[in-house]
């Protein structure tokens, strides 16, 4: 179930790199592994992590999230990101649901994987982190790799250990099924956060940061969809059976203006189904419990929360939520 609305829950995360690791990890493997590259590389793996996708995760004030990962171009003639409905092969993964995290002790307090019999030898050596390590779980309500007829309980577990490297960067360590091989693998992902910001308009003297969630569900026709706006980003996913459509929009500053006024530009579109991203750009037309209709699809506004940027944002939040 979604958490209570709290602007402190809202986050915008860009994946900086994805780094695959063997499974199971050999004893003595340093964890996190990629943080020690290139000087520390006992498994003789690639020395430089890379990012093959443009991956963006938005998490709302109620800890609902939407994660869209699109492959970067390989061929020179490919567009930077697909923005005209395809090709669908450029979509790596898109999913949405709810997230939960809890602080945990360092699972590798000595910095390496090791057998229990040898752990006591290094009991005096512990690492320090700038913030608590957490165990995070993401429950998928819809997932581009699983048709809608698949129940959430039938989807693979999605969880990871989150190592805080700084105030804005977190290294995720996890393991799961490699979709290309069907076999287990371990991996690390470096995530870089940016603070949600207001998208100013000429009509607003004091613009607010918005967290908005729209949801579409028609189980009789195997349809599920989520649209989420957070600050200057908006993403949407709609699935009908196994057919997926996704969009990403970004608020960008217009050139030649004396003050920071801009507009919404679509940066990703795959698939041809309608996604109601545009209504989130005008929050005044939305209210919690209100509906957006397009043909046979009905989208319900589940969350609309607004707050001012800067210190004290949590206390300054203006809340609307369907109970």
Image (spheres, rainbow, N blue to C red):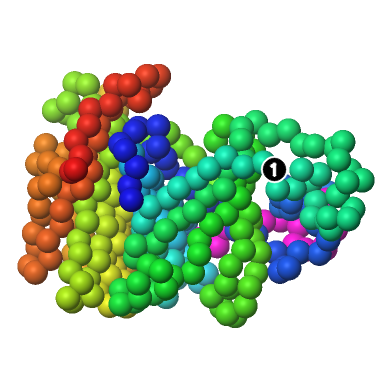
Q: Is residue 38 left or right of residue 268?
A: right
Quadrant position of residue 282:
top left
Front residue of 128 and 284: 128
Q: Residue furthest bottom?
A: 181
x, y percent for residue 45: 77, 63
Q: Is residue 119 left or right of residue 245?
A: right
x, y percent for residue 280: 19, 45
Magenta includes 51? Answer: yes
x, y percent for residue 190: 59, 49
Residue 284, compared with residue 295, is above or below; it is above
Q: Residue at x 33, y 47 (%)?
A: 2
Front residue of 60 and 151: 151
Q: Is residue 238 left or right of residue 21?
A: left
Q: Residue at x 34, y 62 (%)?
A: 141
Number of numbered callouts drawn: 1
Residue 146, compared with residue 4, is above or below; it is below
Q: Residue at x 84, y 58 (%)?
A: 115
Magenta includes 131? Answer: no
Quadrant position of residue 288:
top left
Residue 162, compared with residue 79, is above or below; it is above
Q: Is residue 65 left or right of residue 31?
A: left
Q: Residue at x 64, y 61 (%)?
A: 187
Determine crowd level at label 1: few under 14, some 14-19, many 20+ residues with C-alpha closer than 10 A. some
Query: In this orientation, does residue 234 appear?
Result: no
Label the magenta part by its dominant secondary structure: loop
Quadrant position of residue 196:
top left
| Start-end of magenta stretch | 40-53
Q: Which residue is mark 1?
A: 106
Query: In this orientation, does residue 2 appear?
Result: yes
x, y percent for residue 236: 29, 57
Front residue of 118 and 128: 118
Q: Quadrant of the C terminus?
A: top left
């Amino acid at each position: 179930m979604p958490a209570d609305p709290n602007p402190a829950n809202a986050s915008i995360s860009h994946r900086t790199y994805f780094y695959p690791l063997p499974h199971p990890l050999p004893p003595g493997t340093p964890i996190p592994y990629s943080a020690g590259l290139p000087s520390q590389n006992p498994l003789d793996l690639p020395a430089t992590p890379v990012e093959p996708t443009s991956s963006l995760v938005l998490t709302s004030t109620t800890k609902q999230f939407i994660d869209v990962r699109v492959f970067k171009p390989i061929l020179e003639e490919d567009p930077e990101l697909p923005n005209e409905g395809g090709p669908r092969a450029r979509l790596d993964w898109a999913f949405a649901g709810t997230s939960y995290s809890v602080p945990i002790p360092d699972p590798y307090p000595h910095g390496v994987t090791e057998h229990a019999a040898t752990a006591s030898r290094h009991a005096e050596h512990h690492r320090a982190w700038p913030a608590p390590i957490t165990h995070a779980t993401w429950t998928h309500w819809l997932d581009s790799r699983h048709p809608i007829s698949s129940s959430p309980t039938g989807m693979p577990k999605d969880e990871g250990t989150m190592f805080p490297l700084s105030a804005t960067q977190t290294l995720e360590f996890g393991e799961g099924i490699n979709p290309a091989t069907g076999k287990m693998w371990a991996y690390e992902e470096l995530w870089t956060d940016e603070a949600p910001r207001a998208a100013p308009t000429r009509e607003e003297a004091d613009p607010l940061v918005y967290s908005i969630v729209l949801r579409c569900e028609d189980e009789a026709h195997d349809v599920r969809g989520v649209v989420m706006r957070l600050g200057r980003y908006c993403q949407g996913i709609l699935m009908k059976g196994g057919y997926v459509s996704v969009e990403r929009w970004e608020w960008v500053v217009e050139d030649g203006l004396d003050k920071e006024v801009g507009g919404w530009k679509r940066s990703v579109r795959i698939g041809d189904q309608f996604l109601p991203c545009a209504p989130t750009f005008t929050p005044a037309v939305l209210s919690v419990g209100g509906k957006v209709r397009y043909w046979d699809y009905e989208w319900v506004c589940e969350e609309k929360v607004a707050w001012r940027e800067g210190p004290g944002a949590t206390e300054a939040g203006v809340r609307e939520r369907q109970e």
